[in-house]
């Protein structure tokens, strides 16, 4: 008998989530504004900012923040060289030029130095990602940006609940945006939130989203897709499907299809009350879930061979471990194939983790990303993964990555 497949991710779900979604969606539509407003208040209090505004996606949040900042033609926006490529056309859509800053080889985040190297008189904003939920040194980046009159926007798509020196990510910069996609720390099957110390920005976002459509079908489709993925992962279909994905052409096709699905939330959709209900319940359990993730990530780190390095966390930081990314001493793609074929352990590589944005922008001056991209491997990591499964991941990876 083969051991069961260990998937790389699971959408976080409440015990009776599917039933709850079916039962509550229609009646909650009637009370939408107050339920969403309550969730916004919960998030603002949790992050430690005066206010927050929910919207259709994290990307829509980023776009509206840049619009409110007046970013446009003749300006430059600094972005991490290792992040989601889909963000770049959105920044370019403002008319500004996108300038990538290299990331640190150990933390996979931008640094004060790599950002400093990209400032010019045209710089209007810096987008700082807390990559895979691991806090970037955003305090130092904000301190310098303030002296230059540049706004820092925190990309907290992965990092709800992560802290730096006891402060939540999202509370350092001019504004932060979160994503509530299915595998994010708080899953509401899509949607996003902007937080800020600036009440004008939050007012601007509320005005911009005031006439959005109420259409729960997009959210329901995402919930159904996450449910199907879970059933598929438990079925005999999972292994052949994942084995096929170790062929680069198939992987590229599946990655594209997955991203297309993720990009469903259009700018004119309203964040629904049912999503806000799920978000409020999941936010309550977030600190305990993250504490468990941190303990398990450190168990994994201790079990790996020294030449396999897990993403490093800064002193004074607590990561959210949205993804658990290891840097291997060799190319990750063949290791991923061995993990699946020999150990029945699913893992992600290359653009399934993040994109080489410097290359996408035709820049050859971000050498660390060139090094990281082929060597990064995201191992199975999700709420509910057990200590025994973490031990299994370590054994499998130690064997599969050996020369
Ligand atoms: C780094 C990063 N930023 C922003 C986003 C956008 O979030 P959303 O899908 O809610 O638009 C994502 C989504 O995965 C992401 O990975």
Image (cartoon, grey):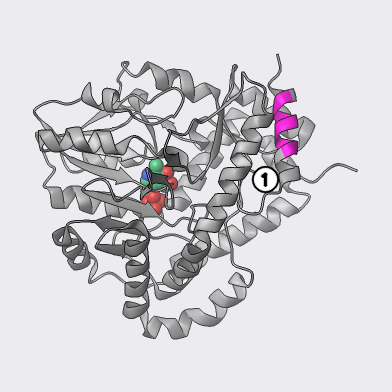
Residue 120's place in the image compared with 46, above or below, is above
The quarter in which the C terminus is drawn is top right
Place residue 78 in its image quadrant.
top left
Image location (x, y in percent) of residue 312: 49, 30
Q: Residue at x 25, y 34 (%)?
A: 141
Residue 391's place in the image compared with 307, above or below, is below
Q: Residue 84 vs residue 361: left or right?
A: right
Q: Residue at x 63, y 43 (%)?
A: 296
Q: Which residue is mark 1?
A: 7
Image location (x, y in percent) of residue 307: 61, 18
Image location (x, y in percent) of residue 258: 51, 47
Can you see residue 23? Answer: yes
Q: Residue 283 vs residue 75: left or right?
A: right
Q: Residue 206 vs residue 304: left or right?
A: left
Q: Residue furthest top?
A: 403
Can you see residue 245? Answer: no
Front residue of this view, candidates 386 and 123: 386
Q: Secondary structure at mark 1?
A: loop
Place residue 89 in its image quadrant.
top left
* Residue 186 among magenta residues: no
Q: Residue furthest right?
A: 1
Image location (x, y in percent) of residue 110: 34, 30
Front residue of this view, candidates 359 and 282: 282
Q: Main secondary structure of the magenta part?
A: helix
Place residue 137 in its image quadrant.
top left
Residue 350's place in the image compared with 236, above or below, is above
Q: Residue at x 65, y 35 (%)?
A: 300
Q: Residue at x 55, y 81 (%)?
A: 23
Q: Residue 275 vs residue 402: left or right?
A: left
Residue density around tag 1, few if under 14, some if 14–19, many if 20 or more, within 10 Å = many
Magenta stretch: give its range: 391-398
């Amino acid at each position: 008998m083969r051991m069961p497949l260990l998937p790389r991710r699971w959408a976080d779900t409440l015990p009776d989530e599917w039933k709850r979604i079916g039962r509550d969606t229609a009646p909650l539509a009637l009370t939408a504004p107050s339920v969403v407003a309550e969730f916004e208040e919960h998030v603002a209090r949790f992050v430690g900012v005066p206010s927050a505004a929910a919207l259709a996606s994290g990307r829509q949040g980023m776009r509206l923040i840049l619009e409110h900042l007046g970013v446009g033609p003749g300006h430059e926006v600094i972005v991490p060289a290792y992040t989601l490529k889909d963000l770049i056309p959105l920044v370019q859509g403002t008319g500004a030029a996108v300038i990538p800053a290299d990331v640190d080889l150990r933390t996979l985040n931008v640094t004060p130095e790599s950002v400093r190297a990209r400032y010019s008189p045209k710089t209007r904003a810096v987008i700082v990602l807390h990559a895979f939920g691991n806090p970037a040194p955003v305090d130092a980046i904000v301190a310098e940006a303030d002296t230059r009159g540049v706004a820092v926007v925190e990309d907290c798509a992965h990092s709800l609940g992560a802290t730096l020196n006891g402060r939540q990510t999202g509370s350092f910069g001019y504004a932060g945006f979160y994503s509530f996609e299915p595998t994010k720390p708080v899953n509401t099957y899509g949607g996003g939130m902007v937080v800020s110390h600036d009440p004008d920005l939050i007012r601007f976002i509320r005005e911009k989203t005031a006439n959005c459509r109420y259409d729960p079908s997009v959210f329901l489709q995402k919930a159904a897709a996450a449910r199907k993925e879970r059933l598929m992962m438990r079925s005999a279909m999972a292994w052949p499907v994942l084995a096929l994905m170790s062929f680069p052409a198939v992987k590229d096709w599946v990655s594209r299809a997955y991203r297309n699905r993720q990009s469903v939330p259009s700018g004119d959709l309203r964040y629904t009350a049912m999503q806000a209900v799920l978000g409020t319940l999941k936010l309550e359990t977030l600190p305990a879930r993250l504490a468990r993730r941190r303990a398990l990530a450190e168990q994994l780190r201790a079990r790996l061979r020294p030449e396999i390095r897990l993403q490093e966390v800064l002193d004074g930081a607590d990561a959210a471990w949205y993804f658990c990314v290891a840097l291997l001493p060799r190319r990750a793609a063949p290791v991923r194939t061995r993990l699946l074929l020999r150990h029945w352990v699913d893992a992600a590589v290359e653009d399934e983790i993040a994109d080489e944005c410097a290359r996408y922008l035709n820049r050859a001056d971000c050498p660390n990303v060139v090094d990281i991209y082929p060597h990064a491997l995201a191992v199975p990591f999700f709420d509910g993964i057990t200590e025994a499964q973490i031990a299994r991941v370590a054994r499998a990876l130690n064997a599969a990555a050996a020369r």
